[in-house]
Amino acid sequence: MPGVVHVQAKINGEDTNFLCEPRQSLLEVLRDVLGMTGTKEGCNDGNCGACTVVLDGRIVDSCLVLGVEAQGREVQTIEGMASPGGLHPLQQSFLENAALQCGICTPGFLLASRALLDAEPDADEGRIRHWLAGNLCRCTGYDKIVRAVIQVSTAPEK
Amino acid sequence: MEAFDFVAPKSIEAAVSILNENGDRARIIAGGTDILVMMRAGRRLADVVLDVKGIPELDEMSYSPEGGLTLGAAVPCYRIYQDEAISAAYPGLVDAASLIGGIQIQGRASIGGNLCNAAPSGDSIPAVIALNGVCNVAGPNGTRQIAAEDFCTAPGQNALQQGEMLVSVSFPAPVANSGANYQRFIPRNEMDIAVAGVGSSVVLDASGENFVSGRVALASVAPTPVFSRAAGDSLAGKPVSDEAIREASELAMADAVPINDMRGTIRQRIHLIGVLTRRTLNNAVERARGG
């Protein structure tokens, strides 16, 4: 009978140990085992990006990662995005641009946007829209989200 | 999801042994972007799930201008298009790797997994076929090779036998004056399943004015990806012209046997195969000429 497995991972910079069943997704582990409910469940099949986390530097859908696959790896979630000094510039920009309504998709959009601007600080609107295609929002119509990201980007044309 | 055991074998031998022992109650996870969705839906059941990303041969991507490309079956898409040398040598493969799912999916999903999942709509498979990809398989009786066009046998089924696994996909080194392209039609801009897709490759002579050979493969118009041998073969020896490309596209359309479903009709899909064959052949020619 399959039992629980001990997993050691770095989550938001902290060495973390947890027990999980092999069938539990990283999303379930984050929310149900570790109580980190900032990561949201949307479609649970890789279409909506609400559960986006950063795994070893790449954004992934945590519903399509097994918790046991996090063994020895580094996970970043929305809980690690703001610093003690204040919100991340993207979080501030989302607030200023009213880039969220119900908020379920927001953690995923923020992590995906941060990954883009970390790699390409001058990403333009076309690049931003392409990069964020794996994140769905059913409230805003996307324009406010894209505008919020453009505001943080250093692209010359805004 | 039903409960299962999780193992992460470190060698092909260890993985094959587990696969052979458990038959189809053992399932491989590479990127997990298809298998976890199917297991959650109860369409695949497993007593044991093998994570193969820790097996060196499946995680390896090696390219040389002489030897070509060996792409480990678990290498995620983003590693292909982040590699400048591979992107320059195989732009047709990059076309497919950079449009499967979104960025999150491309961070995990592999070309090997796309082949094993054997969906008729698998975006990378026509590109792999057009590029003469060969599947390197390991099993209890040793290793064997399967041409990419023979790998998918039915929707969701592949040519792997009991205890076998896909290790890597090999691509010959691109020859001079060659080019390839993959395109699909979807009603959205991104993140959708192909209504129809075409991968084409061509080799031109030194003048760039005549076809030496061509390969054309189709997505979403049959129970498996289709290698339209007639379409590619029709180009050999002909001058590069709209007429030759139109003739090849008509042969590709004749090889399409699609169904009507929620994504498209038979008529629309056959029409799309004609359009996409012409577009991908024209782009392949342009790339072969150095464009």
Image (cartoon, rainbow, N blue to C red):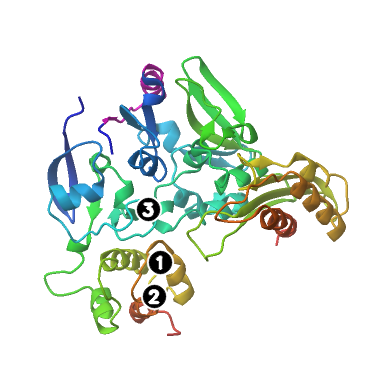
Q: Tell me the crowding category of disc 2: few under 14, some 14 to 19, or many 20 or more residues within 10 angstroms, Cα based.
A: some
* Distance between the alpha carbons at the discs numbered 2 and 3: 19 Å
* Distance between the alpha carbons at the discs numbered 1 and 2: 10 Å
Q: Earlier in the sequence, mark 1 or mark 2?
A: 1
1 or 2: mark nearer the eye:
2
Instruction: Tell me which chain the residue with mark 1 is part of.
Output: A
Q: Which residue is mark 1?
A: A132
Instruction: Report helix, strand or loop for mark 2.
Output: loop
Queried whether the magenta region covers residue B9, the answer comes back as yes
Q: Earlier in the sequence, mark 1 or mark 3?
A: 3
Stretch in magenta: B4-21
In front of the other: A12 or A25:
A25
Along the horizontal axis of the image, is A112 left or right of B57? left
Instruction: Tell me which chain the residue with mark 2 is part of.
Output: A
Q: Which residue is mark 2?
A: A142
Q: Residue at x 48, y 73 (%)?
A: A126
Instruction: Tell me which chain the residue with mark 3 is part of.
Output: A
Q: Earlier in the sequence, mark 2 or mark 3?
A: 3
Labels 1 and 2 in the same subunit: yes
Along the horizontal axis of the image, is A133 left or right of B217? left
The label shown at residue B26 is none
Q: Which residue is mark 3?
A: A46
Queried whether the magenta region covers residue B147, the answer comes back as no
Residue type at the position of mark 2: Tyr
Image quadrant occupied by the N terminus of chain A: top left
Q: Point out residue B171 in the picture as x, y percentages from the top left corner.
A: 61, 39
